[in-house]
Amino acid sequence: MRRDELEHLSKAELIELVLRLQRPEKTSRTSSKPPSTDRKERRERAKPGRAKPGHADHSRPLSDDVSERIAHRPDICPCCRMALTRDLPAEEAGTWECIELPAVRPHVVHHHRLAVRCPGCGTRTVAPVPVSGTPFGPRLHAVATYLKTYQALSYERLQAALADLFGLRLSQGGLMNLLRRAQGRFQVGRQAAVATLRRAEVVASDETGVRIEGCSGYHWVFRCQDAVVHQAAPTRAASVVRAMMDGHRPAVWLSDPYSAQQGHGLAQQTCLAHLARNVAYALEASDAPVPFRLKLWLSSAFDLADAAQAWPPSGAPLSAGWTRSWQPPAAAS
């Protein structure tokens, strides 16, 4: 805002502007903003070999799976320069670990089809094709699927990773066909997970922005007690939820306050983590008593959830030493 615009503001407008500028900035702790948008605080650097301030000092534990053990003995005494023979008793003074990756090279097999002419009738017989239509084996399918989906590599970076790590030269079209073939292996499991989701009494949903083939899209996640379903979609609209649930309305739908995720169940439960972040921001931005009372109420709800995880199933006998000692907190006035 320019100086001349400020000069034309009324006293009330100037007070509102100053109060707005004094409000704390929203962070991932006080809103739904991702942690990557937070400003990084300058922290004191730890000296080499020492833990950072506030962190426990510890060293990396040695591996349990050891491929080889090599004992190293001293040959000469550093004090008198006398030779130390191999028959002298020795004790272990320490262990130094060296970890290395083995050289990985693709295992390529050429299958030669031979033709033989029958000596009786003269018919030329060719051996059948010994492999499937794709030259890529199941392990290569698994590695490419892992790097593309779990590590979120683009086709260009996946192509470079396979070339740099394994010396494999695959075209992007070949990689796309490879992933399509691997996709079929997951269809049965996905259909079973979707069917379980459409029978569930309690369903939770969430979505986040993601790039799909160079375009902006959304990664949806639907979860119930026995299944988790991921769905990529070009839109953030409620139509994605309706298509996934196919008419099923669970007893309780859990989501954030976004309108597209509301109203898909018989009852709506707003995510308490989102509410807690909003309350945290209200505590920083206001001196009113309501945010503090909401914080106490949410803390009681979280404590109840933690205690409920230790309760035995409904109708199960109480184990020895277990009592129903928890009492609900008094409502905040």
Image (cartoon, helix red, strand yellow):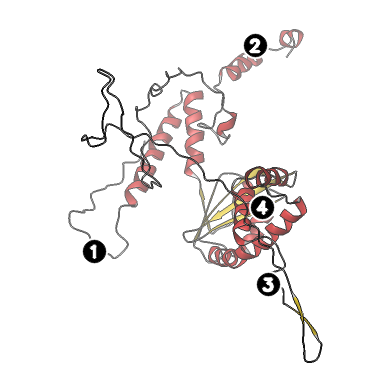
Q: Residues within 10 Å of mark 4 (few under 14, many from 20)?
A: some
| 84 sits to left or right of 52 | left
Q: Quadrant of residue 24?
A: top right
Callout 3: SS: loop
What's the residue type where badge 3 is placed? Pro
Callout 1: SS: loop
In percent of width and height, residue 250 lies at: 53, 61
Q: Residues within 10 Å of mark 1 (few under 14, many from 20)?
A: few
Mark 4 or 3 closer to N-term? 3
Callout 4: SS: strand
Q: Residue at x 59, y 63 (%)?
A: 190
Mark 3 or 1 closer to N-term? 3
Mark 4 or 1 closer to N-term? 4
Q: Which residue lies under the disc numbered 4?
A: 232
In percent of width and height, residue 257 lies at: 57, 44
In percent of width and height, residue 172 lies at: 75, 50
What's the residue type where badge 2 is placed? Lys
Q: Which residue lies under the disc numbered 3?
A: 130
Q: CA distance from mark 4 to mark 2?
A: 51 Å
Q: Quadrant of residue 96?
A: top left
Above or below residue 3? Residue 49 is below
Can residue 240 be seen in this snapshot? yes
Q: Which of the image's four quarters has the N terminus?
A: top right
Q: Which residue lies under the disc numbered 2?
A: 11
Q: Which residue lies under the disc numbered 1?
A: 317
Q: Is there a contact, CB below 8 Å, between mark 4 and mark 2?
A: no
